[in-house]
Image (tube, rainbow, N blue to C red):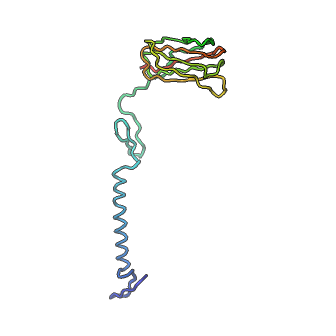
Amino acid sequence: MTSTVETGSGAARGWGPFTGRQLMVVAVAVVVMVMFPVGAFAVASGSNTFITDRVTGTHASVGPNGNLQTHLNGPVTLAASTVVISAGSTTVPATGATFVLFGPFNVAAYKNVRLTLSTLSGPLPSNEFAFVRDGAGVLIDGFTLATIPNGVAGYASRVYEVPGSALTISFTNNDSVDADVQWKLVGRPG
């Protein structure tokens, strides 16, 4: 729908009563009205462009050459490495009685103590139960070993964040076959 408007200098094309120049000014104004708030929001909010420390809330910075600044401020301390508190193996007789594997071991100086138990041969894992007691003899955990892919051996791994003063690990074999049990107790000093 075009129309011709007579002006003093000749004919101009437009849309309805508006000239092409007027329509262009309106179109530019609409684009500016829509894009300016969107651009201002992107600048002010940062979108997903800030790398923020979740503890302190401070933002990472970029150096004059455009590289992310990754240097550490202040003293740096590294977490203590994991140490083996106890490890070994034994045969648990097929009596159905509870057999103390090891303990009590003083674990007061450790955090995140991990106990790993496994059987290399013997009964079905569903017939093997482990019990973890604290220094006062109170039961703090009990579990059944899980079957690993070979279908014969059992495996279990547990973590105790703050285990207390001492741990004693007991094992019950409710099968007619003796169980060869291996254990490992590790922790982080601290």
In percent of width and height, residue 62 lies at: 39, 44
Q: Residue at x 42, y 17 (%)?
A: 164
Quarter of the picture containing the N terminus is bottom left
Q: Name the foreground residue: 75 vs 50.
A: 50
Q: Residue at x 36, y 28 (%)?
A: 75
Q: Is residue 168 left or right of residue 77?
A: right
Q: Residue at x 44, y 21 (%)?
A: 111
In percent of width and height, residue 158 lies at: 51, 23
Q: Is residue 34 above or below residue 72?
A: below
Q: Is residue 146 above or below residue 166?
A: below
In percent of width and height, residue 82 lies at: 49, 21
Give the quadrant of residue 74.
top left
Q: Is residue 18 left or right of residue 121?
A: left
Q: Name the foreground residue: 122 vs 44.
A: 122
Q: Residue at x 59, y 20 (%)?
A: 118
Q: Name the foreground residue: 85 vs 182.
A: 182
